[in-house]
């Protein structure tokens, strides 16, 4: 009985240790990162399967995109708020709250929700493991408009792009955090030993990155209009594009300005 218990315990902890070891070798290394736009560009260029294109040929085109990028990518991202980089002077360590890595939800309903172009493709679920990497918007035009009461205004038209990484549905609301260490307060993805003076110098310039492995279907994108009907109080029309690199997360990295890895934390 004791032997069985030991074997069972090892089976439980060994995958965790093996996965952690995937991240630890990055610490101290200078890595090459890639922009999210550059990561999705080869898959975007593949486009949808042609009506008269055999499936094998289409899959081969997608595999060429994988070969071009490599099986493992390090996708860079700016922190979602430096207030989530919390220094503990007594312990002399910089604590990384998970919200610094992931504080903006990806609009997965635009991709997988009811009526969306990929409804049901990645399975059902109310919570997801995903990250917004970058979001921006530009004004594409404007026009004058008036309402039934004669009030007039100028309506601006925007095009907003959101690019992120999507892994999967979460098993439960308790397991929707990207980092397993951050399921409970104080929600630290991890900590980095650091002297006070070093922390003062580094904190304003730290950058993040995710080590990910792309997986089928590799890239998905959808458009939706919101708000589509401008009003006097909200005189704008916004066309939203949500694009996702489909990939498995491996590690979250904390980098200095020279891309040297200071911390590497396992992901779920």
Image (cartoon, helix red, strand yellow):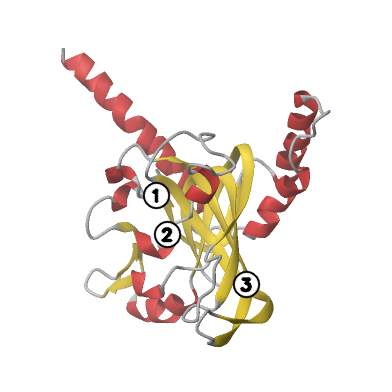
Which is closer to the viewer, label 1 or label 3? 3
Image quarter of the C terminus? top left
Left or right for 217, reference 197: right
> In whole angstroms, how far apart are the C-alphas of marks 2 and 3?
25 Å
Sequence-wise, the earlier of marks 2 and 3 is 2
Work out whether residue 117 or residue 264 is closer to the camera in this orientation and state it. 117
CB of mark 2 within 8 Å of CB of mark 1? yes
Left or right for 22, reference 162: left
| Local SS, label 2 | loop
User: Residue 2's x, y, as percent?
Assistant: 16, 16
Quadrant of res 228: bottom right
For label 1, the residue is: 178
Sequence-wise, the earlier of marks 1 and 3 is 3
Where residue 75 is drawn, which disc sits there? none
User: Residue 139's x, y, as percent?
Assistant: 66, 76
For label 3, the residue is: 158
Image quarter of the N terminus? top left
For label 2, the residue is: 102
Work out whether residue 244 or residue 91 is closer to the camera in this orientation and state it. 244
> In whole angstroms, how far apart are the C-alphas of marks 2 and 1?
8 Å
* Residue 262 seen from this side: yes
Q: Which residue is painted at 32% across and 24% down in the image?
A: 11
Q: Which residue is painted at 60% across and 80% down in the image?
A: 155
Whether 188 is drawn above or below 51: the answer is: below
């Amino acid at each position: 009985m004791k032997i069985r218990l030991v074997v069972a315990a090892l089976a439980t902890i060994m995958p965790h240790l093996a996965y952690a070891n995937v991240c630890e070798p990055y610490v101290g290394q200078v890595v090459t990162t890639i922009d999210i736009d550059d990561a999705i560009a080869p898959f975007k260029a593949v486009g949808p399967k042609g009506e008269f294109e055999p499936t094998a040929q289409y899959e081969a085109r997608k595999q060429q995109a994988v070969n071009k990028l490599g099986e493992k990518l390090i996708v860079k991202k700016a922190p979602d708020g430096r207030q989530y980089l919390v220094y503990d002077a007594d312990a002399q360590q910089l604590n990384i709250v998970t919200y610094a890595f992931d504080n903006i939800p990806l609009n997965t309903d635009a991709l997988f929700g009811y009526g969306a172009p990929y409804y049901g493709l990645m399975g059902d679920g109310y919570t997801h493991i995903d990250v917004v990497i970058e979001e921006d918007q530009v004004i594409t035009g404007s026009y004058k408009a008036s309402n039934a009461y004669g009030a007039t205004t100028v309506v601006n038209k925007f095009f907003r792009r959101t690019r992120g990484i999507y892994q999967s549905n979460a098993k439960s609301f308790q397991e929707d955090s990207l980092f397993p260490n951050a399921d409970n307060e104080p929600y630290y993805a991890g900590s980095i030993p650091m002297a006070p003076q070093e922390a003062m110098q580094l904190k304003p310039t730290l950058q993040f990155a995710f080590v990910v492995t792309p997986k089928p279907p590799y890239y998905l994108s959808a458009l939706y209009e919101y708000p589509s009907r401008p009003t006097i109080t909200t005189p704008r029309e916004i066309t939203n594009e949500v694009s996702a690199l489909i990939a498995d997360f491996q590690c979250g990295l904390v980098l200095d300005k020279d891309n040297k890895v200071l911390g590497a934390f396992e992901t779920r």
